[in-house]
Image (tube, rainbow, N blue to C red):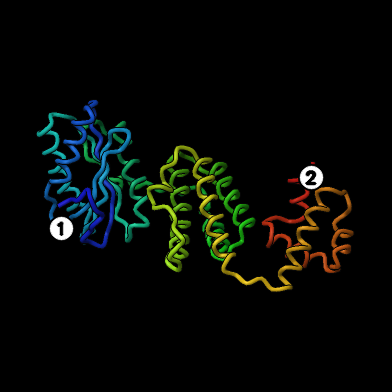
Amino acid sequence: MLKRTSMEFCGGHYFVVIFHPHRAPSTSDTLEITDFISDYHLQDITGYTAKLYDENIVGIYSSPCTDMKKIKEQFSLLHQNVCAAFSIMLTVGIGCWKPDLLSVSSSFLEASTALDYHFIYGKNKLISFYDLKLNPYAGIEYPQNQIDTLCLQIKSGQEKPMIHSLNVLFSYIRENANSMYTAKSLCYDVTNSIIKTLKDLESSSDNLQFPDLLTLTAFETIEELEQTLQQFCQTACSYVNARKPMTLSDYIKLYKIELAKKMLVETNDPLDKIIQLLGYYDTSSFIRMFKKSEGMTPGEFRKTYQK
């Protein structure tokens, strides 16, 4: 039976189903439909259902079965029963199964995308994302290295490089996503990777708490998502850095980086001269150290911040 009061699952595979009533039921009607779906018996399937703000009903389900044909058969019967009980037209979108709950946000996107295909297939249908055979990353290079770098920077507490990497990733999404589905898929993948990293940090502390998956995926624009992720990643970096002992050598390097930043912004002195004034004579070595600290080269920093 489905449970709306607690996230209790029996299977090891998770997927999302979205139910869209095509007439505009009242709030009480929608709640009745939600209760009906929640109480409907699905064999070897458990889950959690809730009404969304747009009157859609979403269910997060778990099942030991990975045969999408069998899963669709059960939801097809549920679909028929809901339509008959409430005399409504209902389109159902089903996302693909995922191996863990942290990945279920991508199944939500798939279910939502499947639901949109009622524009092509018509209303009152059950549409599975699995049958659509869509590849969101066709024609673009998947930014796996950038995502991995971002997660490593969070774990090591490199706040400024982390912010730079996050900016680069979201700029890449804006410039290269060739469809809305591609853009959302990349956003969900970045979000999911960050959530996994934050959860790793959270498990090592009793005091560190980060938002759940639904909180971080409830965004309306890319800018909103980027700002939200940056805030939580900065909190994570602060936590990591608070646990790190700083050596005298680290302090001196940090102090000189701050002096370099001041001179880059407030003077027009060439980089070689600034580096020598700081007591360094290997330009390339200093540039690497500066980039590791700030996420950009001294030249890029001057170009960005000098008025």
Examine the rendering and report whether any part of residue 215 can be seen. Answer: yes
The amino acid type, in three-letter code, at marker 1 is Asp
Examine the rendering and report whether any part of residue 138 can be seen. Answer: no
Residue occupying image coordinates x 43% and y 61%: 199
Q: Where in the figure is residue 307, as x and y percent of width and height?
A: 79, 41
Reply above or below: 211 against 29. below
Residue occupying image coordinates x 26% and y 39%: 51
Q: Where in the figure is residue 46, as x and y percent of width and height?
A: 19, 54
| Left or right position of 8 against 229 | left
Front in this rendered view, residue 37 or 147: 37
The amino acid type, in three-letter code, at marker 2 is Gln
Count neighbours of disc 1 (C-alpha within 10 A) and say few if under 14, some if 14 to 19, many if 20 or more.
Answer: few
SS at mark 2 in the image: loop
Reply above or below: 83 against 146. above
Which residue in the protein does label 2 denote? Answer: 306
Which residue in the protein does label 1 denote? Answer: 44
